[in-house]
Amino acid sequence: MGSPKIKEIIKPSSTHELEAGSFEGIETTLRPMPTNDPEDPLNWPRWKKYVTLAHVSAFYFLFTFLTTVTVPTFPALQEIFNATYAEINYTVAVPALSLALSPLMWSPLADRYGRRIIMIIGCLIAFISTIGSAVAKSYSGYMAARFFQGWGVGPASSVGLQIILDMFFEHDRGQKTGYWTLAIDLGLLFGPLIGGFAALVSTEFVAWLTAILFGTLLISMILFLPETAYPRQKSDGDENSSGDDASNIEASRPPRPKLPFLNFRTIPGIKAPQPWDTTVRFFRMFAYPNVAISIMFYCWSWYWFILCVITMIPAAYPTYTAQVQGLLFLGLILGTVVGEAFFSGTLSDRIVAFISRTRKQPRTPEMRLWLFWPASILSSVGLVIFGLSIHYGWHWIVGQVGMAAFALGIQVGNTIATTYAIDCHPEHVMDVVVFYSFHLNLSAFASPFWIVPLVDMSGWAWAFSSQAIIIAGCTILCVGFLQLYGERLRNWKGPISWSSAL
């Protein structure tokens, strides 16, 4: 199954095996440096890490699943709430707004009280809010419930990725981040597919099914999700510290005290941030061009259009039933899975290793950017094909090909944008992810408000082809700029000026 596992040369003397996706013949120093404490998440057995990863990914799956699961019921919701198609489209945008804002609150709490309790509380809020959306009798009540659904599931983004990076080493970052981004993209696409068949029972059952999923995950989190916050020296990633110094510091650290089953106290050894720290750091992150350019380019020129594709499928195929419309998301699902399986996280890690070996240079974040180019081409071509197929009434399979190509590019781009930004400042993962999550979800919030008028005004072909032009043009400008000047920008700007919580 893949490449043979090899041992890594590290200090202290304990050894760790490379995870799946390792590269034969490559030696690397473990970053961050593990301690001798068996409770250190870096020292956990692989099964425990993957159980935790499964919980994080499941929560992130529901992060977008709740947003789009109602799409096949749009016509029924129009009748229930006596609303227009555009107004029902806003019910997808509203949870995206709370998904953008909520990490600003959740992230400092997770640094203070730990990841586990924040994930559990967030899941509980999402569970209760989903029940509220199922019993809502008015449009305003339904919109309020949708907003708090998004607020509750917010920790799945910033806190969820921090959990992953608490457990896994730098050389596995691309692959594990790829699994995480695959979860959000599959949730976005499986939502309408499952929602179409759930609507066979009733429109309300779509929300009840989502509540069942949140309730099941909540119980599983309470029983099986461990705490990954661990007091770790900043010198792990400090380029001014030698490997021997970092290893001695980490090896000599006392074990983390045992925490209660549900912890509501500050975790010992971790610097507790102020409630406003995350918001302040979010705005300061604009001053770091590698992070700001890569994330804002991807979110505002590329990802923001995905909800336009998803929410317009009922309008593109109005004569089909909700169940058939749900099945029309299979093209997007197939493209997403293929993109992650063959062209995303693991391939990104392999490309970085190959370039580093052939050039005989240390790994740099810019080595990951090469995958942006084919991803951009696929997404652009896919959008043109989809728009033309609807405009000219071509067979539905043509639209499926376009959606698959678009989704493949979206998945690859998501993984590369996230991993590149984190690689630039790995000691500030939470701050980078909050910045990423805000722009990702705010861009998704914006698009449903204007896609219906745009299609009505300019037609399907031009509406989707214009977005393809935007993706291609911004890729040339932004990715080309980062490949040419990214390393110089990082050296010019230097490390992030504020200290991390851990």
Image: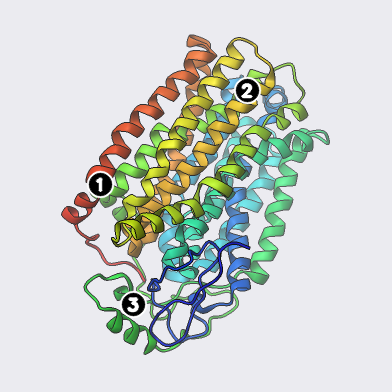
Q: Which residue is mark 3?
A: 233
Left or right relative to 277: residue 226:
right
| Res. 430 image quadrant | bottom left
SS state under label 2: helix
Query: Which labelled disc corresponds to residue 399?
Result: 2
- Proximity of marks 1 and 3: CB atoms separated by less than 8 Å: no
Query: Which labelled disc corresponds to residue 289?
Result: 1
Query: Which quarter of the figure is the N terminus placed in?
Result: bottom right
- Of badges 2 and 3, the one in the foreground is 2
- Proximity of marks 1 and 2: CB atoms separated by less than 8 Å: no
Three-letter code, disc 1: Pro
Left or right relative to 211: residue 279:
left
Three-letter code, disc 2: Gly
Q: Disc 1 and disc 2: Cα gap in Å? A: 37 Å
The answer to which of marks 2 and 3 sits earlier in the sequence is 3
The answer to which of marks 1 and 2 sits earlier in the sequence is 1
Asked whether 303 or 283 is in front, the reply is 303
